[in-house]
Amino acid sequence: MAAKKDRKAFVFLLLLIGFVLAFAASLVFGQTPVTVEQAVHSFLSYDKNSTEHIVVRSDRLPRAVIASVTGASLAVAGALMQALTKNPLASPSIFGINQGAIFTVVIGIVFFSVTSLASLAGLAFLGAAAAAMIVYFLGSLGRDGLTPVKIVLAGAAISALFQSYTQGILVLDEAGLQDVLFWLAGSVSGRTLEMLQPVLPFIGSAIVASMFIGKAINLLVTGEEIAKGMGQHVAALKAFMGLLVVLLAGSSVAVVGAVGFIGLVIPHAARFFAGNDYRWLLPIAALLGAVLLVAADVVARLLIMPQEVPIGVMTAMIGGPFFVFIARKGVSGV
């Protein structure tokens, strides 16, 4: 037992080092060449006349911070969803939560000219919660109640529904399409730390809260009857986990838009390192999600310079084949 704990702690330390390296790479690499020394001096002795210092402080630092926070947020949301539904294919993007959040945000932008991120975050929460409740309701219909297959089908249907509604709105309003097209593809480009501030308390509190329920989740995934027999309030725990997913996914969509597959891929990668112990799986997933999204942003800006690929496209290139692999082979032990 002690050896396993030491191994997980060692993995966590390695991932922490990997995160630091990815964050540093995000500050250095891009269209404007920046050395490590220049990046360090931009914090220690900022020179407003230095192009490199301006690029690091005004563009690359916000991108790295936002990618880190939203990557961790989506990864933890995915891990919670997979535990909640006992479904290896569960994630905010596949279950329609991201699409619901995007739909309500697009409505706010196109029809009501909403520009405040705080208002957009509220709309994203509303859409995410509505999608989650609809999927849960549809997946629970029938004599056999909620099953992994039914909830996946319900999630796919609701995702397609919200996506078609969103596309229909944008087709009817070409100006709105131009305003939100790049945002819909998912991006951290052009985001500022001020845009993250309104949702940071929700993301931070949800991630911290998830770290304290790892032991309870371990008991839940062994079986609801066993958990009830051990005195656990299963319904309250599941409702709380659902709330955390909505907060994490809704906040992320409000800031970076449609970034998919992080919530699907990362929990499986974390499970490889941590097993099914959610006391370790959740923090490892958070770090992995941050590393992946920061690294994806670096690659996205280098791939076709001077243009850049939307980060949502990069994550889809990774997550799409992985989703097909899981769907065909199946994954146990969620």
Image (tube, rainbow, N blue to C red):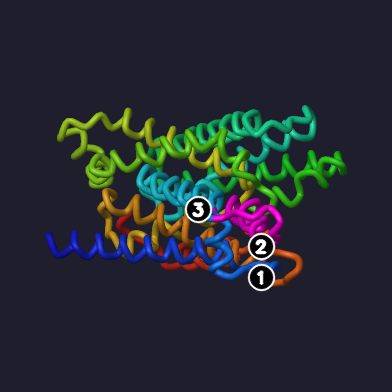
Identified at 52% across, 42% down, the residue is 249
Front residue of 310 and 137: 310
Q: Which residue is mark 1?
A: 33
Mark 1, secondary structure of its residue: loop
Amino acid at the residue labelled 3: Ser
Q: Are marks 1 and 2 in contact (CB under 8 Å)?
A: yes
Residue 29: image x %, image y %?
A: 61, 68
Look at the image and tell me whether residue 153 can be seen: no
Q: Which residue is mark 3?
A: 68
Amino acid at the residue labelled 1: Pro
Residue 138: image x %, image y %?
A: 51, 36
Mark 3, secondary structure of its residue: helix
Magenta includes 52? yes
Q: Earlier in the sequence, mark 1 or mark 2?
A: 1
Distance from label 3 to label 2 (Cα)? 22 Å
Q: Which residue is mark 2?
A: 52
**Side of 141 relative to 115 (left or right):** left
Residue 55: image x %, image y %?
A: 67, 58
Stretch in magenta: 45-64
Distance from label 1 to label 2 (Cα)? 8 Å
User: From the viewer's perspective, is the residue at label 1 or at label 2 nearer?
Assistant: 2
Q: Earlier in the sequence, mark 3 or mark 1?
A: 1
**Side of 225 relative to 241 (left or right):** left
The crowding category of the residue bearing disc 3, from other C-alpha atoms within 10 Å (few below 14, some 14 to 19, many at least 20), is many
User: From the viewer's perspective, is the residue at label 3 or at label 1 nearer?
Assistant: 1
Q: Earlier in the sequence, mark 3 or mark 2?
A: 2
Distance from label 3 to label 1 (Cα)? 22 Å
